[in-house]
Image (spheres, rainbow, N blue to C red):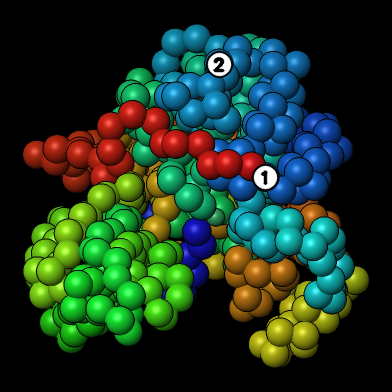
């Protein structure tokens, strides 16, 4: 997932005081955290490159999870592998007592996006996956930030617990949803996350809630010419379903997104197809909106089955809640981004980016490593969903994005893969790690900040009953 956050800049009056508080109090310890990140930089970058090379897709991130977990263990973290029934999920904790701060790390790749780390499109391994969302950077940076805090706790400079979460399958089933349901985030005081992007800024916008499901129709086969009257077409039902869904588009809010793929649609025209299957995703700004849509879509599936005289079945496979933004926490994160300043890219890296931009027709704008000004949250998020959303209803979530790719170049595409495997991505990784570590220093140092973040969280979650979209039990593992 990736969200582009581009709002008009409005600085809250209260922000200045929080910024000063956040930056002023613990500068020395923040500098120590930054120094720790620099010390481990070569190992962390090697780890990121290793995961980039593995390029394992959702729930198959065996070597990627192992590389990160092994490194954490070697650094003194207590590691628990295979948590929440997910073989590639793990937690790594260090320290004791409160506060308990969590950091989320992803590492899954996307199918079919294999690409060399160069400024022209060229496949590294035909048909193989690639890190088109930069999750190799995401996991390594999160671990790097956690490690900096661990170093400070070990040196007696900070008190409390740091916990890294290895969270698989963000791009498919949403590993965090299963981890959240299992209660793995329940004892956290605050949780941090980041995402690679084409710009650097604090996250103040939510993400869309999404539900995904299969619609299946089962009919009766027959010879399509000799005795079609004895057949009942499952594909006819699927077409009617799709027609109903597409007709409904006019009567939904502009915030709604509905998309589907036809997975099974018959084999040959001269056989009346007995089976059809369609995979559909529904999104809206809030989970309640998605629930309501799902109710309407169930009726369309029933109606389509009735018209085609076949059996219909709708099975929900999963989904994510929208992200609950914590503005108090975002202000602390923003202050630390400002404290760090822009990401310094070299003329060679700018040229690399411009070559990609020329190749993809977006204009040679280069890389934007500047810290974007504070922007007011939008009423509706831009398109996209993430399983970070589910975690954000259990614990206050603070997020940021850091520049790892050329401005406006296509995402989930070869340019992202290319940059995630070279110095541009590495710089964004290190920057994100530093911003998260500096923010965490504030959280450990000043209980008042944590209290203020939690007060906002409690206010916003009052009366909310969390119910995940995912079905019972762990998700089935895909075949290799
Ligand atoms: Zn992503």
Q: Secondary structure at mark 1?
A: loop
Locate residue 67 relative to residue 474 in the image: left or right.
Answer: right
Tell me if mark 2 has few (under 14), some (14-19) or many (20+) residues whose alpha carbon lies within 10 angstroms of its own: some
Picture coordinates of residue 107, whole percent (x, y): 62, 43
Ligand 1, seen in the image, is in the quarter at bottom right
Q: Is residue 66 above or below residue 410?
A: above
The residue pinned by badge 2 equals 80
Q: Residue at x 57, y 30 (%)?
A: 88
Tell me if mark 1 has few (under 14), some (14-19) or many (20+) residues whose alpha carbon lies within 10 angstroms of its own: many
Q: Which image quarter holds the C terminus?
A: top right
Picture coordinates of residue 150, whole percent (x, y): 64, 21
Which of the numbered marks, if any, corresponds to residue 56?
1
Picture coordinates of residue 85, whole percent (x, y): 44, 24
Locate residue 42 relative to residue 175 in the image: left or right.
Answer: right
Q: Secondary structure at mark 2?
A: strand
Label located before the other in sequence (2 or 1): 1
- Report which quarter residue 353 is drawn in: bottom right
Q: Residue at x 50, y 9 (%)?
A: 96
């Amino acid at each position: 997932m990736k969200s582009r956050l581009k709002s008009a800049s409005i600085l809250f009056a209260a922000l200045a005081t929080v910024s000063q508080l956040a930056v002023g109090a613990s500068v020395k310890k923040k500098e120590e955290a930054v120094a720790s990140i620099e010390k481990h930089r070569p190992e962390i970058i090697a780890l990121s490159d290793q995961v980039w090379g593995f390029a394992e897709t959702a729930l198959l991130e065996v070597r990627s999870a192992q590389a990160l977990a092994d490194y954490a263990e070697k650094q003194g973290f207590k590691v628990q592998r295979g948590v929440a029934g997910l073989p590639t999920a793990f937690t790594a904790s260090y320290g004791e007592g409160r506060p308990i701060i969590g950091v989320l790390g992803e590492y899954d790749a996307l199918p079919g996006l294999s690409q060399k780390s160069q400024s022209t499109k060229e496949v590294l391994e035909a048909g193989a996956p690639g890190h088109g969302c930069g999750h190799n950077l995401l996991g390594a940076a999160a671990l790097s930030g956690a490690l900096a805090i661990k170093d400070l706790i070990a040196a007696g400079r900070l008190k409390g617990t740091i916990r890294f979460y290895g969270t698989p399958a963000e791009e498919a089933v949403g590993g965090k949803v299963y981890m959240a349901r299992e209660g793995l985030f329940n004892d956290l005081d605050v949780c941090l996350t980041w995402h690679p992007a084409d710009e650097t800024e604090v996250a103040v916008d939510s993400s869309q809630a999404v539900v995904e499901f299969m619609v299946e129709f089962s009919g009766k086969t027959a010879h399509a010419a000799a005795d079609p009257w004895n057949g009942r077409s499952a594909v006819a039902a699927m077409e009617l379903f799709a027609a109903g869904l597409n007709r409904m588009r006019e009567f939904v809010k502009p915030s709604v997104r509905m998309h589907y793929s036809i997975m099974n649609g018959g084999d040959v025209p001269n056989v009346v197809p007995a089976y059809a299957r369609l995979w559909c995703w529904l999104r809206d700004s809030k989970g309640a909106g998605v629930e309501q849509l799902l109710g309407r879509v169930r009726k369309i599936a029933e109606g389509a089955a009735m018209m085609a005289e076949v059996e219909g079945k709708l099975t929900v496979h999963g989904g994510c809640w929208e992200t609950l933004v914590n503005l108090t926490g975002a202000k602390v994160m923003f202050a630390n981004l400002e404290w760090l300043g822009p990401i310094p890219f070299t003329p060679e890296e700018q040229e690399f980016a411009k070559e990609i931009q020329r190749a993809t027709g977006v204009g040679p704008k280069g890389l934007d490593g500047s810290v974007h000004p504070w922007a007011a949250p939008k009423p509706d998020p831009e398109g996209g969903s993430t399983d970070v959303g589910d975690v954000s209803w259990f614990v206050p979530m603070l997020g940021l994005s850091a520049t790892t790719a050329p401005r406006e170049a296509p995402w989930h595409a070869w340019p992202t893969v290319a940059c995630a495997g070279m110095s541009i991505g590495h710089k964004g990784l290190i920057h994100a790690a530093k911003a998260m570590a500096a923010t965490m220093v504030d959280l450990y140092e000043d209980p008042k900040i944590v209290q203020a973040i939690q007060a906002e969280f409690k206010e916003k979650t009052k009366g909310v009953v969390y119910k995940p979209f995912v079905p019972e039990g762990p998700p089935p593992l895909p075949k290799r």
